[in-house]
Image: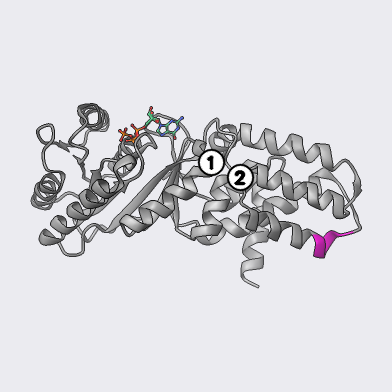
Amino acid sequence: MALGFFSRLKEGLSRSTQKLGTNLTSVFTKRRLDEESLEQLEEILIAADFGPEVAENVIETFRKTRFGTEVSEKEIKDALAKEIAKVLSPVTVPFKPNLELKPHVVLMVGVNGTGKTTTIGKMARFYGDQGLKTMMVAGDTFRAAAVEQLQIWGDRVGAPVISGKPGADAAGLAFEALKRAKNEGADLLFVDTAGRLHNKSALMEELAKIIRVMKKFDETAPHSVLLVLDATTGQNAIEQVRIFKEMVSVSGLVITKLDGTARGGIVIALAQQFQLPIHAVGVGEKAEDLRDFSAEEFAAGLVGDTDVEVLTTEVIEEKEG
Ligand SMILES: Nc1nc2c(ncn2[C@@H]2O[C@H](COP(=O)(O)OP(=O)(O)OP(=O)(O)O)[C@@H](O)[C@H]2O)c(=O)[nH]1
C-alpha cells in the first residue's frame, strides 16, 4: 500500500503519543538517569501496552548506555523510538500478491468487528487501482449484515462479490468462488470469514473446513491467512493471536483502528511476542485508509518529536553492522 502517508499515521497515533509523551515529560525534565527514573520509565512503557519484555529490554539498554548521565526528554524519546524500530523492523513485511498464482487466495480471519471486511475492501481498492483483478467471497454466511457489508465494499471498489443464501455452507461457497476466480483469471481472491469466538470449536471447525475444501481445488490455497486485530482492544489482541494461531496457520497480521486509539503500543508487544509479519495497518474507515506497515514510521509516529529519516538511517546502519 502506498507509502508517504506518514502524516495520517502520525495523526492517528496522536492519542497514543500524547499519553506516552505526557508521562515521559513528568519523569524526564533534565535529570540524571537513575534507578528511580528507570523504574518509572518501565512503568510508563507497560502502561503504554509495550509488553513487559520490551519494556525491560528498553530499560536494560538505557541502563547500559546512559545510566548516571543527564538526559533530556528529547534524548529519551529518540532512543526509545530507536529501540521500538529495532523490535518492529523484523516484522515489517509488506503484503505482496503472487501474480503467478491467479488467484492468490487470502483468507481473512479475526474476531467480529475487528475490521476484516473493511480491510478486504481497502486491499481490493489498492490492488484494483494497480490494475489487478480482485474478487471477494462472503464466507460469514450466517450474518446477513456481514454479506451486505462486503457487497457494499464490492460495489464501491468495483470487485465482484460471491455470496450464497443465508446460512449456506461457507466452505462450499469458498470452493465455488475459487473455481470462478480461476476461470475468470482473477489475481486475488479475498475470503471473508465469520469471527464468532464465543463458539470457538465451531469456528475452528468452520475455518478448517474452508481450508480443506479449497485445497481440493488448489492444494496450495489459501496462500495467505491474515489475522485482523483491532488495536483499540489492547492486550486482548495478544489473546486473539494465541487463539487464532491454534485454529489456523496465520501467515501475517493486519492491525486496524490505529487512528484515534491510545493503545498503539500493543503493536510492539505483538511484534515481540509472536514475530508474525505485520503487513498493513488501518488508519481509518475509508478505502484509502490502509498503509504498509513501517517500523520507523510507526516508532516515530508513536513517540512523536522524532525524525523518521534519521531513525531509518540509524536502524539500517545498525542492522548492517
Ligand atoms: N477508525 C477505524 N475504523 C475501522 C478501521 N477498520 C475498520 N473499521 C471499522 O470497524 C467496524 C467493523 O469493521 P468490519 O470490517 O465490519 O469488521 P469485521 O471484522 O468484518 O466484522 P464482522 O463483519 O462483524 O465480522 C466498521 O465500522 C469499520 O468501519 C480502521 O482502521 N479505523
Dividing the picture into quarters, in which one does residue 284 lie? top left
Describe the element under mark 2 as helix, strand or loop: loop
Which quadrant of the render holds ligand 1? top left
- Count the numbered circles shown: 2
Q: Is residue 155 above or below residue 63?
A: above
Across and down, in percent, residue 129 comes to 31, 40
Magenta extent: 63-67
* In the image, the residue with mark 2 has its CB under 8 Å from the nearest atom of ligand 1: no
**Which residue is at a point 59% across and 36% down the rendered structure image?**
13
The amino acid marked with disc number 2 is Asp
- Asked if the residues shown at circle 1 and circle 2 are in contact, with their CB atoms under 8 angstroms apart, the answer is yes
Q: Is residue 187 visible?
A: no
Q: x%, y% of residue 181?
A: 13, 48
The quadrant in which the N terminus is found is top left
In the rendered image, residue 182, in percent from the top left (x then y), is placed at: 12, 53
Q: Residues within 10 Å of mark 1 (few under 14, many from 20)?
A: many
Q: Which mark is residue 49?
A: 2
Q: Dot 2, crowdedness within 10 Å: few (<14), some or many (≥20)?
A: many
In the shown orientation, is residue 140 left or right of residue 51? Answer: left
User: What's the CA distance linking mark 1 and mark 2?
Assistant: 7 Å
* Residue that numbered label 1 is attached to: 234
Marker disc for residue 255: none
121 or 45: nearer the viewer: 45
- In the shown orientation, is residue 71 left or right of residue 159? right
